[in-house]
Image (cartoon, grey):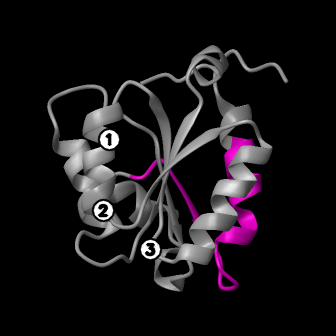
Amino acid sequence: MDLTQKELTLSNKILVVEDDALSQFVIVEMCKELGFECLTADDGAEALDLIAQNATDIKLVLMDIHMPKVSGLDATGAIRSTSEDPPKNLPVIATTADSNWHDLQRCHEHGFQFHDASHEWAILNQHKVVRNYNASMPDNHA
């Protein structure tokens, strides 16, 4: 799915999937500073429910990898295995502090478009990742 700046402007919802309340709060606040509206989920199961209800409105997912109930890996796999688009090609950015996920190839193999991994905690880079993703979209001349 090609996501244009115009599409982000028309529906600028980001789904933030994070089980740590403080991390989730900081990510949401950073996204709001960039003009995005956020939906939040505490685990992959909740994320899949929100995506099913808002498939055409959500334009980007920031997905933690390690969560209770349904992990980010399993949730992303479920998104990719659906026959409907959206959400099949919904952009998903993996967020994690787990150094095992610093390998971009490994993230791509699990269906993530981008990844943001940091030893300090991925939150510190969320603002940059969302801004860079936004700037990478076709027709974005900002």
Q: Earlier in the sequence, mark 2 or mark 3?
A: 3
Q: Nearer the viewer, residue 95 or 113?
A: 95
Residue kind at label 1, given as amino acid type: Ile
Give the residue displayed 76% in from the left and 54% down from the top. 128
Which residue is drawn at the image coordinates 44% and 27% (left, top)? Answer: 57
Q: Amino acid at mark 3?
A: Asp
The image position of residue 16, as x and y in percent, is: 51, 55
Which of 45/75 is in front? Answer: 45
Residue 114 is covered by the magenta coloring: yes
Q: Is residue 88 visible?
A: no
The residue wearing badge 2 is: 44
- Under mark 2, the amino acid is Gly
- Under circle 1, the secondary element is helix
Please provide percent x and percent y for residue 80. Answer: 25, 44
Sequence order check: which comes first, mark 2 or mark 1? Answer: 2
- Separation of residues labelled 1 and 3 (CA atoms): 17 Å
Label 1: how many residues lie within 10 Å, few (<14), some (14-19) or many (20+)? many
77 left or right, relative to 99: left
Specify the quadrant of the image occupied by residue 58.
top left
Q: Nearer the viewer, residue 126 or 119?
A: 126
Query: CA separation, marks 2 and 1?
Result: 10 Å
Q: Earlier in the sequence, mark 1 or mark 3?
A: 3
Q: Quadrant of residue 99?
A: bottom right
Figure check: 118 above or below 59: below
- Nearer to the camera, 109 or 1: 1
> Disc 2 and disc 3: Cα gap in Å?
9 Å
Residues rendered magenta in the picture: 112-132
Residue wearing tag 3: 19
Which residue position is annotated with label 1?
51
The answer to whether marks 2 and 1 mark residues whose Cβ atoms lie closer than 8 Å is no
| Label 2 crowd bin: few (<14), some (14–19), many (20+), radius 10 Å | many
